[in-house]
Each structure stands twice: as C-alpha cells, then as structure tokens.
Image: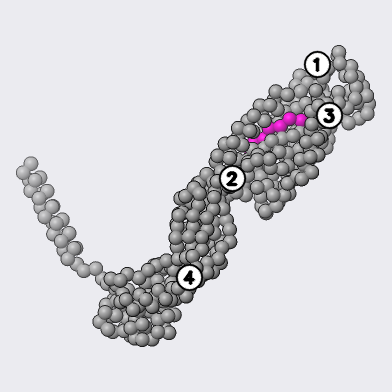
C-alpha cells in the first residue's frame, strides 16, 4: 500500500509540479533544525497544493532515537509530503480589500519520511515480525496540520511564516509510540501566490 | 410650590427672550455671499476681488469650485470670455460632474459652461455583477455601481470593491464627449462562495490524509 502512495506522489509530483507556480525555501526548527523546499501550485480558488521536502540539518537530540550503531540510529529525518493549503481571504472582509498581500492559510498534508539515510539502516531488517529491509519498508508515514501567513512584499516575492504539527506513525515492527513534533519555519517565497 | 412654579415660568420667559433676540440677530455674511451681492449690484471689480479672496482662503473644494464659477460668471458678464473660460475650466476640473442651476445663472452662461465642459470631459458608465460595488478612481471613491459620471478626459486607475469579492483593478481612459462603458462580472473573481467550496474540499483532504 505504501508503494502505491509513493508512486502516486511521484507521478503526481512530476505531472503537476513540472509547472509549479511558486517555490518556498525555509529553515526552521522541529525536533532538530531543518531546511525545506516546497513547490506549489493553485488547484482551485484559495486552494494550493504543495510538495514539501524537509531534511534535518542536525541529528535529533532525543536519546531514544540515537544509537552509535548506524543500523539502529534514527536521529535523522528526511520527509516528503503533499500539503493542501487553504488560503484565508482576509481581503474579502469589508474594508480590507487592500490587504490581499497578507495571505494567512491553514494546511493539512500527508507524507512519508526516512529516519536515516545510511545504507546500514536501510539494509538492516525491521524489528519484530516484519523483518523487511529496504527503502520502502523503512519509510514511516506522517500527517501534518498547521497554518501560517505569507506576506507578499513584491508581486512575486514573499516572506512566509509556517507552523505545522507533524504526527509520525510508529515505525513498522518497532514498538515505539507514535511521535509528534512541532515544525516552525520562516521562508522566502518566489512566484505568484494569487 | 407656588414659588417654584413662578421661577419655572420666569425661566421660560427669559429663555424665550434670548432665543428670539438670537433669531433676530443677523448672521455675518460670508465673503462668498458678499461677492454674490456685489455681482448682483453690478459692482464687478469688487465681486472679482471677493471671489479671488474666497479662492485664496478656501479649504474646501466645493467652496473653491463655487468661487471659480462665480468668478467666471463675472468675467462672462464683463464679456471677458478668455478670463471666464480659464475660471470655468478650473471649476470643472474640481468636479466635472457638477451642473449649474437654472435658478442661479442665466441660460447663456449655463450654455457656455456646458460647452466648456464638453471640451474637457467624457462620461463613464460603471456596472458590476452583482451591483453595489464601490467605484474608486485613482483611489478616490466616486460612488457605487451602477454609476454614470462625468469625468475629466484622461487616464485613471479604476477599482471596483465589494465586500465578499476580490476587488478588480484596471486602467481606463475617458475621452472627450465619449460615453465609456465599464462592466465587470465580480463573480468571475475569487469570492466568498468559491472560498466556501474550497473550504469543503480542504476539509475533505484533511480528513482523508488522516485516514490513510
């Protein structure tokens, strides 16, 4: 099932984001510092679809995730998610028509991530009954829910503040509870966000 | 009790007297009114000075426009048509949509004013779907749609603003003696209905992303 979703992500990403209308580069803090890039395109009035890729810049400090054995260390994180953002139209409120350049939004998304990019980790069988190895079987799913605000300071350039609550699923076969992390970032956005 | 009643009656009488005396007092005439009196008395040089003083000291466009019109009217009466035209053009520039009253000015002057106006203005007709959108020209509110307005012939930035709809901005040009129509369907812009539809789709997407 996971493979299906990954393939869908890739196909969708390739077809839709080939003509991405805007791009955001962000840095921020979740469980560790991270950098992210998001490609977005409007799919309907007030609705934008984004493909977001984030990667930790430093290891997670959580001792439960760290391990000197590269087969078991899960303190890195690389996540790809598809996010739907609903832009809140404050410019439709009487008297605020001139404030179209302030674009608050709420966002929800679904993604998959890897907790280590090391070959040893990928090749090590999952714990428990699963015992599978490889890229697809190491991926963990996560949901995001959040919001933010984009200030378009020029027609095709803006500054974005973003907040997301990320709920990571349990890794398959490993008896660890699902994790939650808060992701806060500031970024610059290029492209028309109308 | 009787004493109180006596004082109340006295108070009413005094207040009534003060009111009547205040009523009887004439308000001092404004400079504009003085100018008009001079004009009516045929004292044109004094009228011209008074109207010029009004223009110099005026803080409102409406008052300035009235003074320019009367100044033009005075020059017109003196057959100084060139000077009259200059003043009338200034008055038209302040508010091109203003029309002279037949009760106040002679027909010849009204005709002269209208002709001067034709040389400077055109008509803009503004319409939106749905109606009652505010119309801004160069950021100045001129009314709500549907709206017909005489405007100076020049280029403007036109903006339609209606609550619940994304405002629409465009460049436009008014040409002399031409009626220009501007009709915009605001339903084609983002509006509160499209936002509601998008919200439903977003909620569905958010729900589905959690059920995978």
Q: Do labels 1 and 2 share a chain?
A: no
Can you tell which of label 4 and label 2 is closer to the viewer? Answer: 4
Task: Give the residues in magenta.
Answer: A105-111
Which residue, as the protein is rendered here, is positioned at the far left?
A: B2
Q: Is residue B141 left or right of residue A58?
A: left
Q: Are marks 4 and 3 on the same chain?
A: no
Q: Are marks 2 and 3 in contact (CB under 8 Å)?
A: no
Q: Are marks 1 and 2 in contact (CB under 8 Å)?
A: no
In this rendered view, identify the residue nearer to me: A110 or B63: A110
The residue to which callout 3 is attached is A114
Coloration mode: one colour
Separation of residues labelled 4 and 2 (CA atoms): 35 Å
Marking on residue A71: none
Separation of residues labelled 1 and 2 (CA atoms): 48 Å
Total labels drawn: 4
In this rendered view, identify the residue nearer to me: A193 or A146: A193
Tag 4, which secondary structure? loop
Can you tell which of label 4 and label 3 is closer to the viewer? Answer: 4
Marking on residue A175: 1
Q: Do the residues labelled 1 and 3 touch (CB within 8 Å)?
A: no
In this view, A189 is above or below A51: below
The residue to which callout 2 is attached is B190
Chain where mark 2 sits? B
């Amino acid at each position: 099932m996971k493979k299906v979703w990954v393939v869908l992500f890739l196909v969708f990403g390739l077809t839709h984001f080939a003509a991405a209308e805007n791009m955001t580069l962000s840095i921020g803090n979740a469980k560790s510092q991270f950098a992210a890039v998001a490609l977005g395109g409007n799919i309907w009035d007030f609705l934008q679809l984004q493909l977001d890729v984030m990667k930790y810049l430093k290891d997670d400090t959580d001792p439960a995730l760290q391990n000197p054995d590269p087969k078991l260390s899960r303190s890195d994180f690389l996540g790809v998610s598809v996010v739907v953002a609903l832009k809140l139209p404050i410019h439709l409120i009487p008297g605020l028509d001139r404030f179209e350049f302030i674009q608050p939004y709420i966002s929800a998304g679904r993604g998959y991530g890897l907790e280590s990019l090391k070959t040893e980790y990928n090749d090590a069988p999952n714990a428990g009954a699963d015992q599978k190895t490889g890229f697809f079987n190491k991926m963990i799913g996560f949901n995001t829910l959040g919001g933010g605000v984009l200030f378009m300071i020029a027609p095709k350039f803006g500054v974005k503040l973003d907040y997301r609550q990320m709920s990571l699923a349990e890794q398959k076969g490993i008896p660890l509870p699902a994790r939650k992390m808060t992701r806060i970032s500031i970024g610059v956005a290029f492209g028309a966000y109308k | 009790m009787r004493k109180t009643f006596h004082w109340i009656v006295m108070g009413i009488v005094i207040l009534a007297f003060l009111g009547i005396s205040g009523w009887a007092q004439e308000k001092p005439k404004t400079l504009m009114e003085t100018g008009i009196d001079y004009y009516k008395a045929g004292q044109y040089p004094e009228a011209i000075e008074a109207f010029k003083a009004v223009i110099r000291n005026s803080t409102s466009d409406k008052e300035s426009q009235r003074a320019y019109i009367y100044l033009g009217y005075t020059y017109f009466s003196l057959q100084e048509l060139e000077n009259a035209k200059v003043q009338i053009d200034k008055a038209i520039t302040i508010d091109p949509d203003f029309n002279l009253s037949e009760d106040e000015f002679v027909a010849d002057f009204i005709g002269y004013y209208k002709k001067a106006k034709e040389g400077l203005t055109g008509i803009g007709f503004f319409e939106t779907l749905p109606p009652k959108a505010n119309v801004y020209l160069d950021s100045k509110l001129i009314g709500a749609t549907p709206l017909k307005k005489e405007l100076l012939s020049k280029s403007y930035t036109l903006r339609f603003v209606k609550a619940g709809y994304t405002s629409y901005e465009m460049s436009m040009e008014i040409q002399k003696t031409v009626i220009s129509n501007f009709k915009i369907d605001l339903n084609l812009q983002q509006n509160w209905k499209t936002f509601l539809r998008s919200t439903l789709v977003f909620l569905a997407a958010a729900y589905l992303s959690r059920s995978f």
